[in-house]
Every structure is written in C-alpha cells, then in structure tokens.
Image: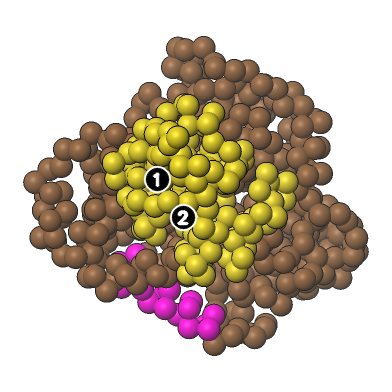
Chain colours: A yellow, B brown
Amino acid sequence: MAEKFTCHKVSEGIIEGEILLSSDDLCFYLVDPKTGVVIEKNHSLEGQSIADKILVFPSGKGSSVVQADGMYQLKMSGMEPKALIIKYPDTVLVASSIIMEWPVVDRVEDGFYKSIENGDRVLLDADHGSLTILS
Amino acid sequence: MELTREEQDMLDGKYGKGTQIAMKIQVAIGEVFNAPKMVPVSRTHVALSNQEADLWFVEKMVHAGAKCRISPTVNPGFNLEYFQCITTISKKDEEMIRRTRKAYKEVGATLTFDCTPYLEKNVPRFGEITAYSESSATPFINSVYGARTNRESAQSALCAAITGRTPLYGFLLDENRKGQVLVDVQAKIKNDFDYQLLGYAVPKKLKFKTPVFVNIPTNPSPAALMNLGAQLNTAGNVPMYHIVGVTPEAKTVEEAFQGDDPERVITITEQDLEEVHDDITDPGGKIDFALFGCPHFNLDQVAHVAELVKNQKLKVRLWIMTSSLTKELASRMGYLETIQAAGGDIVDDTCMDQPCWEFLYGKKGVTDSPKCAYYTKRRNMQFVIRKVDECIDAAIRGEI
C-alpha cells in the first residue's frame, strides 16, 4: 500500500527513485564524480554510490565553494542523485540545488523517516510537496 | 515574499536577463527560509574557486549581461604566472584560470584573490548587512566584527552582489544570532593551532548549533579567531560563534544567550582535541613539502615563519599562501628574502585546492591547517597536521 507524506519544496521537480539513507551530513565534493561513490573517511556512506538515488540525509556540510562544485561535477558526469530529502536546509545547498536543477524537499512529516528503509521506491513531488512510498 | 517595486522590476527582467536570474535565485532562497522581504547589502565577498561550477555560473551571468552593483572581493584561484615558473601548467588549466579572471572582471568584481578579505580591503562594521561566502570569512565577520551575513554560497553571494539585495532571514536577524550551546573549554588553549583543533572538535559534538565559548584565553590573535571560524565552518556549518568577553555580542554569558538558558552544555577536554588531531592527520614519516596559508596567512604568521627559518636550510620545499598585499609587505620587511634564503617561498593569489599543485600529488606534506588537509583528499595529497613550529622543524629535517 502506498503511503503518502507531506513535505516542503526547496527546489522544484517530480521524480521517482530508490531511497539511500545517510545518517551523516554530506559534502558532495567528497564524492568521486566518476562513480558517485562517497570517499569521505568514516562517513556512513563511505564506499557506496549515491548515483541515481533519492538521497536522505540531515544536512549539507563543507566549505561554501566545494559543495556547489561537487554537485556540478556529479551533474556533468551523470552520477548525480535523483533528488535530495533533507532535514536542515542551508543556504549553500539550497542555492546550489536550485542552480543545478536538482529536486529537493525538506520539512518532511516525521512518520516518513520511521517508514522508509534503504532500497524503498519513492515518488518525490517537490512541486506539490508530497512523498509517496511505492514499495 | 514582499518585493519593492525595484526588486519586482529586477525579477521581471527590466534590469536585464542577468539581474533577473540573480533575483529569481534569491527569491527562491528567501521562500525556503520564509524571508518576509529583501534587504540591501553594502558589502559582498564571493568565494571564487576557479572550478567548473564556479566558472560555469559566472560566465552564464556575464553572458546574460549581469553587472555587480556592490563590487565583491573574491577568493583566490591560482597565480598562473608564478606557477608557470616553477612547474608545468596544462593548457586546460591555463585557459580555465584566464577565463575565471576575465569573467569576474567583466561581472564587476574587485580582483583581490584573497580568502581573508575581512583583514584587509573588505572590512565590515558592527551590524552591517552583507553577503559573504567563504568558510573562514562568514564566521569571522559575524563573530569577531558583529557584522551580519548568512553562510552564502559563492553563487548566492554573487547574486547578492548583482542585485545589491539579500533575503532577510537567518543570521541577519537578532534572534538567530543568539548562542545555543555553552562550550566549556577545559583543554588548555596554548597557541593558534589549538584553535584549529577546537574548531574542528566542536561540530562533532553539537552539529550546527551556535557555540558560546567560555574559559578561552581573553586575547586571542586574529589568526586564532580565523582558525577557529574556518574549522567550525569546515567540520560543520557553523557560521557564527561567541567567545564570552571577546566577541562583541557576548560581553557576558547572558548577552550571548540573549537571556535564555543554553540548550546544552558541553565540555572540550585535552582528550577531545587529541582525538580530533589523531583522526584528521596522516601518520608521520618522510615528507616532501610544507604548505601554509589555508586560510591565507597574515603578516604576523609570515613573520613567525621567517623567524623560525632564519639561517636554516630546509630539506623540503615550503610555500606560504597569502594575499598580494601581505606578500608585498613581507617583501618590504625582509621576511620574503629570509624565507627564500632558507629554500621556501611566498605565493600570492593562490588557494591550496587548485590544480597548480599537481606536482605534489601522491606526495606527503606538513601543514597546520585541518581544512587544507580535508579538501585535498580529492587531490591525492597526504598531510601530517601539526602546529607551525613543528611543521618548520619537520621541513628542516625532511621528516616528522
């Protein structure tokens, strides 16, 4: 049964994809642009690829410069995530995602976080502020 | 979001396509953060990076006819002419830095190429509303000067420079500037390097909360404050801190918390600093180079290195990155000559995270900056992180 949750648009877009959960904040510069694999030491996603995933993580981190560049390089190599679901938006991540045209949402209903696991398929609709767990 | 007539005209394209794009991005940011309106900015700093995204965006704005109303100072890329003398710069990298310089000049930036504009050339006053990007700059001007900026990205700061506005939210508002967590520093803070470790250790414990430090020495140097902010904002997103009795919005603990109680109290011990140090440094051994100036060294720091290397012969190459103004002063004061005589050099207009350092890839260096070591993971450079004096000692002996 599809469960639907409300959320809030940060950057527009509607997309379906597979969930990848990160308990740590993310700096996209510490992701290998050729493979989409996280290379940051001791990160909860170290060694895993974020390419084509709907990435769930608390917040962006890292210097204001490198976040945008990391995102841009992933976009150019086609290894970018499909969308981002974040808890705490920061200006750098917000500005960069609007410029890169990555769909991003925040202010997600609490129940969503309790219901999802890695690999779940989700329909993210930033424009109408909804997240639907498909399977 | 409520816009003035002029702001609405910018959004509608009456001031040209470039200004329209900038305003559109800023309105979107404002809406995410529930900003009620835009406010004028009187200073801006753009963290130019000479990287692909940076060049792509600034050229896009130039082609769209954008021109800055509030000319921003800008971060360093690399000093092409210097590096062409000491190594080979690829055609691609040469073209990139030339395009970066050209695009920023055309968009109306002030070409300072320095990541510490808050020490010279772009110094705000208390309460001034600004838009600064650059991870060492935002905490410095918010915390040390009491000026106001959000943690802008290079792109959002460029938009602010173009429109002369920024959405009113976050650290521009009194209530968001109050301290959240009291940080009781039980570790002995003995030198500027300890502030690096302190800045790196705190976000691990308290995430993005605004820290209020107590039990820190009451007369920290500018370099100490620069280090503290740079590392807080690298290890986490912390664009503001208070030090009770030091920073202007924290004359007392009560003032720092605006009369509220701290959400939490944490302590930082010697052991916390040691753990952070062990976590971020590569192991010692033979080294190939020493690199300082992330953020750019100020004149006092350059003078200190000159003192340490006086009449010494370095076993490995050494560079200090700084602003063109500081390099000029270092030359007048004789520091440059002393450092060069020992086998080191000072390079201006240059960042460590640039392709000009390719000749050091795969090699091991010493530095005093965790931030420097953090970003160069991408460039396959290894760094042993120590305080400056130990780094110099290592450079003289060729190992650590």
Q: Judging from the image, what secondary structure is the residue with disc 2 in?
A: loop
Magenta residues (range): B92-109
Number of marks drawn: 2
- In reply to whether residue B300 is colored magenta, the answer given is no
At x 72% / y 27%, what residue is drawn? B268
Tag shown at residue B293: none
Q: Quadrant of residue B266?
A: top right
Q: Identify the image quadrant of the C terminus of chain B.
A: bottom right
Q: Quadrant of residue B393?
A: bottom right
Measured as percent of width and height from the top left, residue B212 is found at: 56, 25
Measured as percent of width and height from the top left, residue A117 is found at: 58, 38
Tag 1 residue = A124
Given the image, on which type of amino acid does mark 2 rest? Lys
Q: CA distance from mark 2 to mark 1?
A: 10 Å
Given the image, on which type of amino acid does mark 1 rest? Leu
Q: Judging from the image, what secondary structure is the residue with disc 1 in?
A: strand
On the same chain: label 2 and label 1? yes
| Viewer-proximal residue among B382 and A49 | A49
Q: Is residue A90 above or below residue B157?
A: above
Visible in this render: residue B214?
no
Classified by dominant secondary structure, the portion drawn in magenta counts as: helix
At x 24% / y 53%, what residue is drawn? B24
Please state if A33 lies on the left or on the right of B23 as rendered: right
| Viewer-proximal residue among B321 and B40 | B40
Tag 2 residue = A82
